[in-house]
């Protein structure tokens, strides 16, 4: 009988008919009586090739028996080959893909397996590149010397580890992260805690419990008594998302990601103030926080990423100070988030784009408030919205040289204005292209409380 592979390679092995050894197939040949062969049920082969032992059994029906000769043909990968199998441990689900060893392509798996001669493998990296649930993955294993003589080599991965590998932070909605970050920043401004991001998932629900809560008391509706009261303007407790600041913050995060740096100053030497000036964004003062996440866990969503960013800033006194803003300098903010496959860059730009002035004027007194102060060094005009409320009566003048016209008011001379509001108890007025030097001059007709808010945001006016 001749024993050979499908490629014609002769197989040397100890040969058994059923449980009885009948000899050794020297150079793939062994003398067996045809009648003895026909009476047996199985042919068993035991041997070693390439250092890998094998023990194979075949039904006699697989032997091609003719008058001239008998031939047993076996698959070549059955002897002297590793069988590499790749799967997910928790559910035994198959993983398929291209197998590489030390950067060299070995072949494509079939039904999660591939047969490889140990002579073709080097000790070192073994990589499976494939697709799972529509997402590409690269899983790295190690082929070690201790595996050299093993027939079956199982390579597995935990399901959560695979989820982590195929997770791509670029699939997150960056706009949603940005809004969530601003919401949490506003919570910090107002003394509220930012929750921890989600913890790793677990199938163990043994510690699950339902908390009981006291019912809320019934609310009795009472018609409020409304008392007319003069209410001053104040800087807002909550930052508004400003579209122009947001565009700048997004560009900053994108630049850091694409150029692989992390710094307030760009490689060209430009910082946040110069960026805003280059884009002619009007601001009185401003600030910037930057953050780069570590590797984002696959089980985090947009809100978890936002929590990690804001809590990271909270851990740094300087970054926390910008968010808390005890002096209420800032009115507007822009958030920009840009993610790589595993990390995200975040930029928070804050700016004072509202100016609030509260003044008490005795009768026949003058004062003025800058609209565009030359000292702010913003050599471009801006659109403004002015709101004034008066408890009393004043004359208000919009002028293009505040200091000069204020002196005219003190001297009781004529005030050169481009808009006047005489004996007013308040007004709202918007105009475009407020230049350096523009101001509001106020002259009281009686003892008066004056509160004024100037909005430069350009996004929205209240």
Image (cartoon, rainbow, N blue to C red):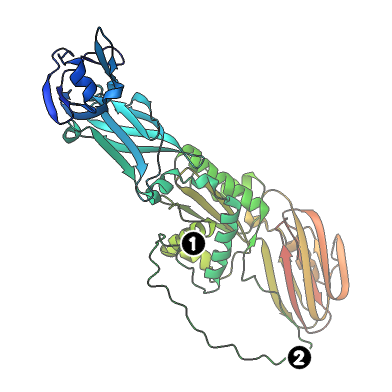
Q: Residue 337: x percent and y percent?
A: 54, 50
Farthest-out residue, top = 68
Q: Residues within 10 Å of mark 1 (few under 14, many from 20)?
A: many
Q: Is residue 134 above or below residue 63?
A: below
Q: Is residue 141 above or below residue 200?
A: above
For residue 224, which numbered disc appears in the image? 2
Q: Is residue 274 above or below residue 428?
A: above
Say which element carries label 2: loop
Q: Which residue is mark 1?
A: 307
Q: Quadrant of the C terminus?
A: bottom right
Tell me the CA gap for discs 2 and 1. Answer: 39 Å
- Compared across the picture, whether 414 is left or right of 203 comes to right
Q: Residue 351: x percent and y percent?
A: 61, 59
Say which element carries label 1: helix
The reply to whether residue 269 is in sight is no
Rendered residue at 65%/70% (across/down):
235
**Of marks 2 and 1, which one's residue comes earlier in the chain?**
2
């Amino acid at each position: 009988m001749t024993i050979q592979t499908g490629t014609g390679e002769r197989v040397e092995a100890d040969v058994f008919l059923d449980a009885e050894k009948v000899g050794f197939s020297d150079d793939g040949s062994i003398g067996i009586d045809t009648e003895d062969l026909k009476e047996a049920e199985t042919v068993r082969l035991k041997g070693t090739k390439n250092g890998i032992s094998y023990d194979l059994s075949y039904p006699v029906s697989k032997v091609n028996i003719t008058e001239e000769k008998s031939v047993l043909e076996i698959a070549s990968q059955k002897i002297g080959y590793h069988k590499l199998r790749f799967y997910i441990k928790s559910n035994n689900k198959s993983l398929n893909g291209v197998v590489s060893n030390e950067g060299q392509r070995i072949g494509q798996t079939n039904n999660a397996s591939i047969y490889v001669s140990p002579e073709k493998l080097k000790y070192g990296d073994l990589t499976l590149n494939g697709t799972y649930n529509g997402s590409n993955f690269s899983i790295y294993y190690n082929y070690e010397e201790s595996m050299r003589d093993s027939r079956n080599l199982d390579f597995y991965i935990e399901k959560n580890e695979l989820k982590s590998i195929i997770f791509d932070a670029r699939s997150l909605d960056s706009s949603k992260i940005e809004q969530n970050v601003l919401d949490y920043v506003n919570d910090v401004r107002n003394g509220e805690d930012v929750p921890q991001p989600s913890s790793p998932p677990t199938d163990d629900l043994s510690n699950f419990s339902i908390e009981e809560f006291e019912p809320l008391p019934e609310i009795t509706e009472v018609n409020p008594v409304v008392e007319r009261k003069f209410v001053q303007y104040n800087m807002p407790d909550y930052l508004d998302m400003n579209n122009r600041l947001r565009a700048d913050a997004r560009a900053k995060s994108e630049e850091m990601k694409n150029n692989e740096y992390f710094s307030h100053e760009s490689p060209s030497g430009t910082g946040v103030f110069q960026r805003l000036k280059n884009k002619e964004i009007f601001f009185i003062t401003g600030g910037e926080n930057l953050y780069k996440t570590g590797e984002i866990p696959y089980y985090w969503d947009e809100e978890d990423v936002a929590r990690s960013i804001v809590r990271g800033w909270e851990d740094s006194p300087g970054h926390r100070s910008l968010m808390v803003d005890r002096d209420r300098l800032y009115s507007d903010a822009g958030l920009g988030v840009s993610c790589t496959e595993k990390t995200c860059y975040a930029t928070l730009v804050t700016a004072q784009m509202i100016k609030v002035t509260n003044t008490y004027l005795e009768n026949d007194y003058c004062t003025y408030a800058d609209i565009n102060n030359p000292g702010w060094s913003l050599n471009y005009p801006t659109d403004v919205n002015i709101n004034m409320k008066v408890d009393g009566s004043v004359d208000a003048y919009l002028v293009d040289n505040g200091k000069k016209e204020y002196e005219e008011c003190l001297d009781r001379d004529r005030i050169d204005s481009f808009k006047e509001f005489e004996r007013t108890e308040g007004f709202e007025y918007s105009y475009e292209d407020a230049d350096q030097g523009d101001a509001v001059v106020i002259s009281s007709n009686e003892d008066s409380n004056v509160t004024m808010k100037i909005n430069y945001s350009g996004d929205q006016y209240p």
